[in-house]
Amino acid sequence: MDHTSRSSTVSANATRMVDVLVPVALDQTYSYKVPRGMELKAGDLVGVPLGPREVLAVVWAENANPDPRLHNRLKEVSEKLDLPPLKPELRSVVDWVANYTLSPRGMVLRMCLRMGENLGPERVRPGVRLVGDPPGG
């Protein structure tokens, strides 16, 4: 049996995993599977399922040593957004600010991403507007 072909087959079948940081009040990253054919690197903006909803996230690092017990429980990255990746310097600033201010990294990331369309459409704010003259006046 040729050991080189076996090891290349194992590595070809191995699922890549990445750790993503979600812009919510959490300090931890979450691991997700990378779908076949999708190329991701640190800093890429992606869509991932988080509970019942789809959220924006940033690929924080390649997960080179995933926990084998979690392999079947992990979800896949839904999409890679067509936006420029976050530079390593900005990701370092997120880590530094979170550490210095004792804030969750996700909230610092959210602050950095508060640019127009990056976090989706603006929230609808219901309200009442009075028009015309008041009755009996």
Image (cartoon, helix red, strand yellow):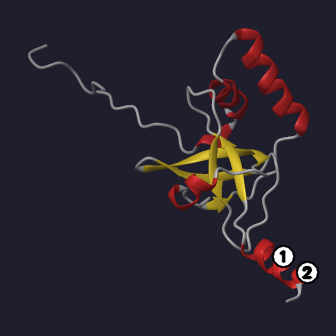
Q: Residue at x 57, y 53 (%)?
A: 69
- Residue 133 location, quadrant: top left
Q: Looking at the rendered structure, which numbered label has been put on residue 4?
A: 2
Q: Residue at x 68, y 62 (%)?
A: 34
Q: Is residue 17 visible?
A: yes
Image quarter (top left, top right, bottom left or bottom right) of the N terminus: bottom right
Q: Is residue 7 above or below residue 128?
A: below
Q: Position of residue 73 (x, y in %)?
A: 51, 56
Q: Is residue 39 above or below residue 103?
A: below
Q: Is residue 7 above or below residue 18?
A: below
Q: Residue at x 60, y 41 (%)?
A: 119
Amino acid found under the numbered disc labelled 1? Ser
Q: Position of residue 40 (x, y in %)?
A: 78, 59
Amino acid found under the numbered disc labelled 2? Thr
Q: Is residue 53 or residue 124 the one in the foreground?
A: 53
Residue named by callout 1: 7
Q: Residue at x 85, y 78 (%)?
A: 8
CB under 8 Å between callouts 1 and 2?
A: yes
**Residue at far front of view:** 1
Number of on-image labels: 2
Q: Position of residue 113 (x, y in %)?
A: 70, 35
Q: Is residue 35 above or below residue 53?
A: below
Q: Secondary structure at mark 2?
A: helix
- Residue 115 location, quadrant: top right
